[in-house]
Structures are given as C-alpha cells and as structure tokens.
Image: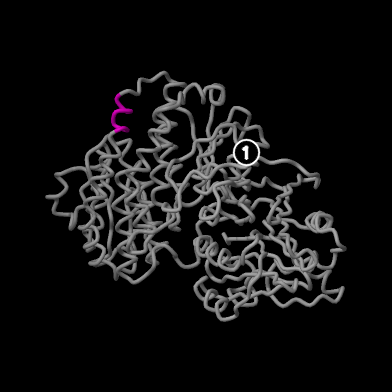
Amino acid sequence: MCGIIGYVGQNDCVDVLLEGLKQLEYRGYDSAGIAVINNDRKINIIKKVGSPDKLVQEVTASKINGMCGIGHTRWATHGKPSDVNSHPHRSGRIALAHNGIIENFTDLKSVLETMGVEFVSETDTEVIAHLINNNYKGNMLNTIKEVTALLKGSYALAILCEEEPDKIYVIKKDSPLVIGKGKGANYLASDITALIKYTDQIYILKDYESACISKDDIKFYNKNFEEILKTPQSIDFSLNSLRPEENGSFMLKEMREIPDAVRKTMQFYSDKDIDAELLPIVKDIDSITITACGTAYHAGLVGKYLIEELARIPVSIDISSEFRYKKPIITDRTLTIAISQSGETADTLAALKYAKKLGSKSIAITNVRTSSITHMVDYLMPTIAGPEIGVAATKSYSTQLIIMFILALSLGRIKKGINTEELEKHLRALPAKCESIKNDSEDIEKLAAQFCQADKVFFLGRGLDYAVALEGALKLKEISYISSEGLAAGELKHGTLALIEQDTLVIVLLTQKVLESKTMNALHEVKARGAQVIAVTQDEAVIENEFVDFVIHIPPANDYFMPVLGVMPLQYFSYYMAVSKGYNPDKPRNLAKSVTVE
C-alpha cells in the first residue's frame, strides 16, 4: 500500500516523479504529492487529494522544478484522504514520504506537543518529520539512527533536507524499498515498476538498511549504520509488460495472459529437479501449515486439499492476520508455506517470522523474486506470471495454483512414492485449455450485462469447487461492489438459504465429477426458491438440466486441475459485471494491490 518515488540527477526531477506516481497508482490512489528542492535550496511541496492526474494539473500550473525530489501516492491509514493528510509531509527544513504504520505515534505526538510542536495533519507520518527536524544537527545518518530507534511499527522513508539539497536519504523496516542505479542520476521507489523506464539495475534494501543517494553515488549502510557494499540486480521484465490492454484495462490484459503465465510457470519447474531441491527441507516434516491472505488464501485452500490427498500429510491453513494470535502448533517438523503475490504482505510476513521463530521449515510462493519474503525462507517457489498491475489478482492466482499442483505432486512422490506421470500429463494440458476459455468469453460478457443489476450473488461448490467459489465471490465483490458470498454447497441450508428469494443469482460450480450429484442437491434447493442459476461445468449433460438457467461450459480435465479452469469464467464474469456497471476494474475503491500494513 502507498507508493514512493524519488529522483536525484542532472535533469529536472518533476516529470520522473509524476510518471513514477502513475506507475505506482495501483498501490494507493486516494491522494498524491511531490516535494522538490529548487535551485535556491528550498523545498516546494504540492499535494492533492485524488488520483495522480489531479496532481499533474496542479504541478503543471505551478511550474516548480528541481533536480532532487520525492513523490508519494497514498492509501489512507491514519487520517481521511485530504490535501493536508497527503504526503510528503514537512517540518521546517525536512520533507519526507512514508509507507507503513507507526504504532506508537500517539505517544510520540504527545511528547512533541509538550515541546510546542504544532501538527497540521492527522497522520502518523508527520510525527517522523518533526522528530527528524528537531534532532537534525548536520549529520542526517545520526539523526535517522536516533529517530528510528524511537519508532515502533513499519516504515519505508524517503527524506529530503534543505541543508543537503543534492541528496535523498532512505531507510526501511517491513515495507519495500528499491534503489535504481542510473547514469548521471539515481532513483528510488517502493516498487520496481516505477523504475523500469529509467534503469534495469536495482538494489533491494533489507530491513534496517539505509542509503544516501546522490546523482553520482549511492552509499549503503547496515542496521548499525556502518557503510556496506551492495551488488545491483537486473530487472527481468520490460516496459511493455506494464502497459494495459488497448481499452485501458490491466485486468483484462492480465486475464488474457493466464495461458502464457501458466505455461511459463510450468516450464520453469520442468527445467528443475524439484524433488531433489525439496527433499532436504521436507524429508523430516510431519505436518504443514499454510498462511496467506485474500486470493492467496484461496490458492492455499486448493493446496491443502491436494497435499492431503496426494501426500497424506496433515495440512492446516490460516488467514495470516489471525495466525499469530491463535498460538498455532508448530515444531521443527512443521513446514510453513507462505503465499503472497507481492511478497510484501505485512500479515503474511509476520506470520512467517513467527513460524520460523518456532523452528518451522519454510517455503514462499510469490510473484516477485526481489521481495522481502524471498529473503526469509528455506526455499522459494516463484510464480512466473510477470507483473500484475490490476488490483484484483487473476493471473497470479492461476500461477499460484500451478505451484500448489507442482508442490503436491512432488510431496506425493517424496513422502508416499506415488507415480505422478498420468497427473503430470493432465497438468501439461492446462495451458491449451486456458487458451480455449480465453477465446470464448463473449457469452460471459452477455451474461454479465444481463445480471449487472443484481444486488447479491451466491457462489456454491464442494471440495475444490468450494475454494473456487470463494475466489469467485471475492473477485465479484472487490471490483463490482456487489454483495457476494462463496459457500460450501452443503452449508447452504444451515442459514444462508434464508437469503435466497425470487431471481437471486446463484452461480454453482459443478466441475468435480465425484461431487456433482451432491452439489446438485443445493442447486435444487435454490431453484425451488426462485433463484436464477448459472452453472460452471465440464459436464455436457448439465446443459440440458431443467434446474439450470445458464451454463458456462469449460474444457474437460482431471478433477484435481479444475480450479485453474473453473475460476477463469468467474474472473471474466466479475470483470464484465464491473464494466457494465461503469466501474474501473483496475482501481476498486478502498483497495490497494500490495497490503504492506497490518
């Protein structure tokens, strides 16, 4: 959540800052601002509630310029979206942008107020600006050391000082920050996507590391503020991957990339001896715990089902934000699997740290191989989805499912000695089947136009279909703002059936052959109450069923692998529902792509 961009170089920084904020808009977009040091060594700040487009208009009219500056796009935590609560924040000669949450800011604020400091915003960030300004005595590194020692919580900070007009200082803890190395200029951002236009060489800051950035040099410091050397990494994707579909939608572009993302992820692991790499980590485990949030949690539910079925290892799964507070039973014979698209999800990182503290082995599944989570685990399983800009996860979810299949098959071979050749053949057939769904989405668009005025939608499924039902409901609610709920089909009559009335829309997943007849019972129950029923199925016979009003037919496949195929029509349905209602599916209200705060 929230995005930071920074530039120091030999050219005007304003265009770089504004372009970077546009690239980072998916991280937070309720307000944006920039701070620039001009040729008179004075900081000018312009910030505006709303999208970066509104900021651009304000900045263009102001004609501010300078060769050193920072920018920020905000997703509100402390204080409502407003001009005054926007970043960067200022105190005297200091301006800074901040991602994260300062948990003890009220105590620090009280102390500062007794010293006569006046606050103008409702944010936790303003506290940091005042602390740095009050403590600065000519040595910024010493000041940062003193101030960060007082802070409890998470932070990525980008700091300007009028007395050092050609430098940007940065430090991070539990919030992402990367530095880009250029020619005659250097950059910083909370996300690689903001830098790809300017450089392909980046440095990843670890927790408690800091840096002093000037146009010709970058000095790095460890947690003791001792200078260290860091080696840059190459960015492995192009600017084209950050451009939306012709109609301007990243989500549609990314859904259409699912077949290729699935294919690339499978190819990546086919080139590895996955069993040999996993064996040292999993040979002594007797239980698995999965921790994740949102869409990643739904991928974990599929993983739980597959691992228990194929490897016969007991698997527990917890929402990351609940994990630490339930005193989970974890030992050195537990494997913790943490799933996070961004690799920066604060709750998932915290859960993983807790599990490791208890002695657990660990695997991370993430789409960002330079993210914080990659440095914390015994084994990394990246998804090869490419950049995903749309807030609603689509191709990253599909590739997470592929990883869960690959992991479950490997654990089955290692722990139970099963022969997986036939299942692997089914797995290899998935990209072509995903392609056929992509090419046949027009009927789904028509269905969405027909039902876009629905005020509630229920998704039903059993077994693996239940996990898909949860994901379908999440996609619909987050981009079309329709109240939607995913249910285990057998639970319908334990309360939710009371909400089914004439013309209520119910979407039934019927992809699991062995459970189809049981799920049909729930279908009969909702139809008897007047519901409109859409069935997603691989069974041709369902088309003729009198209890089904509409059928979305998907290619037949082994039941284990149906979640990849079953979810795609639901993603397209959600997208077209949002578009039919006039909403931007890339920017759902109140949501951000990377949830980097608790």
Residue at the image position 40 percent from the left and 62 percent from the top: 477
Residue at the image position 31 percent from the left and 64 percent from the top: 577
- Residue at the limit of the structure toward the left, as seen here: 544
Q: Quadrant of the C terminus?
A: bottom right
Is 427 magenta? The answer is yes
> In the image, residue 486 lies at what x, y percent?
37, 54
Local packing at callout 1 (Cα closer than 10 Å; few below 14, some 14-19, many 20+) is some
Q: Is residue 450 above or below residue 572?
A: below
Is 468 magenta? The answer is no
Report which quarter residue 392 is drawn in: bottom left
> In the image, residue 318 lies at what x, y percent?
53, 45
Residue type for callout 1:
Met
Q: Is residue 125 above or below residue 255?
A: below
How has the structure been colored for display? Answer: one colour
Majority secondary structure of magenta residues: helix
Residue at image mark 1: 376
As drawn, is 477 to the left or to the right of 428? Answer: right
As drawn, is 543 to the left or to the right of 375? Answer: left
Q: Nearer the viewer, residue 96 or 286?
A: 96
Magenta residues, start to end: 422-428
Residue at the image position 61 percent from the left and 41 percent from the top: 352
